[in-house]
Image (cartoon, rainbow, N blue to C red):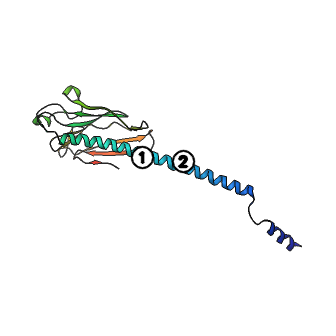
Amino acid sequence: MNREYLSKTIRESRGFSLVEMSVVSAIVILLSATLFQTFKTEAQKTRTLDRATALITADLRKAQSLAASSIDFNDICGYGIHYVNSTTYLIYRGSDQDLTDCRTTDHNYVPADGDVIYQNNIKMIQTSVSFLDSFDDIFFEPPDPRVYVNDKSFPDEPTSTDITFCIDETSDCRIITVENGGRIETP
């Protein structure tokens, strides 16, 4: 009798019920949707940071190129990048002096010394991206261009500055390092 009962029980339980299959399917769909949304958000943050990195690097290279391609070295001391606020910076043109005087001037942005704004209020592409901290002025002096970070030049005083920007002050950040030897390092 025990054998018949066991045999009958095995024959009746040959699979999962419709309710069990529905519950398992719902759980798998819910987990898949959650993971997909997480990956999509992370990919979007990465693209946003990539665009911000490209913008800032392009503007650094623009200032460097403007200084290197200055035709009349007797008029302009060079071009630089200046931090304005957490979402804005500017490109400025150094004071109009002879090249011999340029090495002795303050290379940080000082409007009273004759520095002129070349391109004002350059904002980050995305409103969610902002600078974590202020950064030192970066100035490119022709003809090489010689690079000044916070008015310090290589090889006199080797130094660098980091431009750090994040998405909504989270841990998703990028750092661009500018050395006064002229190297611009991006992640």
Q: Which residue, given by chain and number where applicable, does mark 2 sit on?
A: 37
User: Residue 107: x percent and y percent?
Assistant: 20, 35
What residue sits 18% from the left and 37% below the top? 78
Quick one: which residue is furthest to the right in this view? 1
User: Residue 65 falls in which quadrant of the image?
Assistant: top left
Q: Which residue, given by chain and number where applicable, does mark 1 sit on?
A: 47
User: Residue 136: x percent and y percent?
Assistant: 28, 37
Mark 1: amino acid? Arg
Mark 2: amino acid? Gln
User: Residue 106 falls in which quadrant of the image?
Assistant: top left
153 left or right of 87? Answer: left
- Quadrant for the N terminus, please: bottom right
Query: Dot 2: few (<14), some (14–19), or many (≥20) neighbours within 10 Å?
Result: few
Secondary structure under badge 1?
helix
Secondary structure under badge 2?
helix
Query: How far is mark 2 from mark 1, CA to CA?
Result: 15 Å
User: Residue 69: x percent and y percent?
Assistant: 17, 41
What residue sits 38% from the left and 44% below the top? 51
User: Residue 47: x percent and y percent?
Assistant: 42, 46
What residue sits 50% from the left and 48% below the top? 40
| Residue nearest the observer in this picture, 15 or 152 | 15
Q: Is residue 78 above or below residue 23?
A: above
**Earlier sequence position, callout 2 versus callout 1:** 2
User: Residue 24 falls in which quadrant of the image?
Assistant: bottom right
